[in-house]
Amino acid sequence: MNKLIIPFIAILLLTSCSKQLTSFKTKASKLNINNLDFSDLTLRTKIKYKSGIEDLKATANVRIKKDSLIWFSLTPGLGIEAARGWITKDSLILVDKIHKEYSVLKFKDLTEKFNFNLDYHMIEAVLLGNMIWPVEPTDEVTKEESFFNVSKKEGDLSITHFIGRSTLKLEKLEAVSDSTNNSMNINYSEFDLISDKIVPAKAAISIEYTSRKDGRRKISNIDFDHTKIDIDSKKVKYSFEIPDKYKYVRR
């Protein structure tokens, strides 16, 4: 059951490739990025995860209160809810309803374990196609035929954002850790106009990293397909509880 949460935390390990770009004289501060703004949002999402011999599929119901919390429920098949989770500013709680167990994962512990600064904002941004790292006036901006490209450094990471010239949305992201060479590519596609807001319906994430268990290089692929998106049109409930009989498991 642990593996079904991977799409929500796999962004710990990151990807990149370099490109030769033409110079473009503009200021990053003038790019009016079309980030998705909302108060409450619900998603119904099909998830595919493949890594080596592992090949998992699930449907996720997700509820998001902006900059605050993410509630989700995972159903791998046959309409039976297998897990439920709750992501807050400091931790991720996962309830395994099949084995009647639960775990609490603190972001500070995950950051130390993986040597990467993981936080709530990053997970929310990846799910919705928002900018993970804001564009700063000092960032380097170049252009291709279809994109404005914003390159920057964030601590150990070298990052390139590809901003669609027609959508002004983040359409691609490439990032690499200078110290570990762990890397991540994200591609967003099939943009829909919902409640006058531009939202990507699909995201494909490719992650390459060195396994801490055996030291081998591995590649994981995660696909999101948002089949239903609702923005600020109804009251959203975020109720969450852990049954007393469930056993705590340290991860």
Image: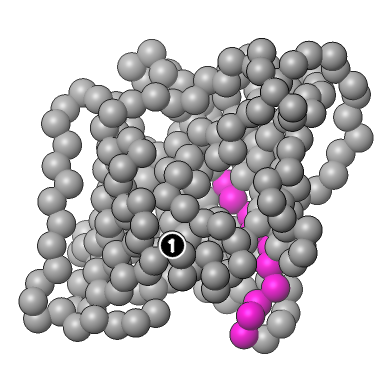
Q: Decide: is 132 above or below 192.
A: below
- Residue at position x 90%, y 21% from top? 23
Judged left or right of residue 141, residue 201 is left
Above or below for 176 versus 233: below
Image location of residue 153, percent across then percent down: 73, 43
Give percent across and percent down for residue 161: 68, 34
Q: Which residues are magenta?
A: 204-213
Query: On the image, which quarter does residue 151 sit in?
Result: top right
Quadrant of the rendered image containing residue 11: bottom right
Q: Residue at x 37, y 69 (%)?
A: 105
Q: Nearer the viewer, residue 27 or 39?
A: 27
> Is 147 covered by the magenta stretch?
no
Which image quadrant: the N terminus? bottom left
Residue 9's place in the image compared with 25, above or below, is below
**Residue 207 belongs to the span the image colors magenta:** yes
Judge left or right: residue 79 versus residue 219: left
Q: Position of residue 20 (x, y in %)?
A: 91, 35
Task: Please name whichever residue, 73 or 58, is drawn nearer the observer in this view of the structure.
Answer: 73
Q: Which residue is mark 1?
A: 107
Q: Is residue 108 left or right of residue 112?
A: left
Q: Residues within 10 Å of mark 1 (few under 14, many from 20)?
A: some
Q: Secondary structure at mark 1?
A: helix
Check disc 1 and give the amino acid type.
Phe
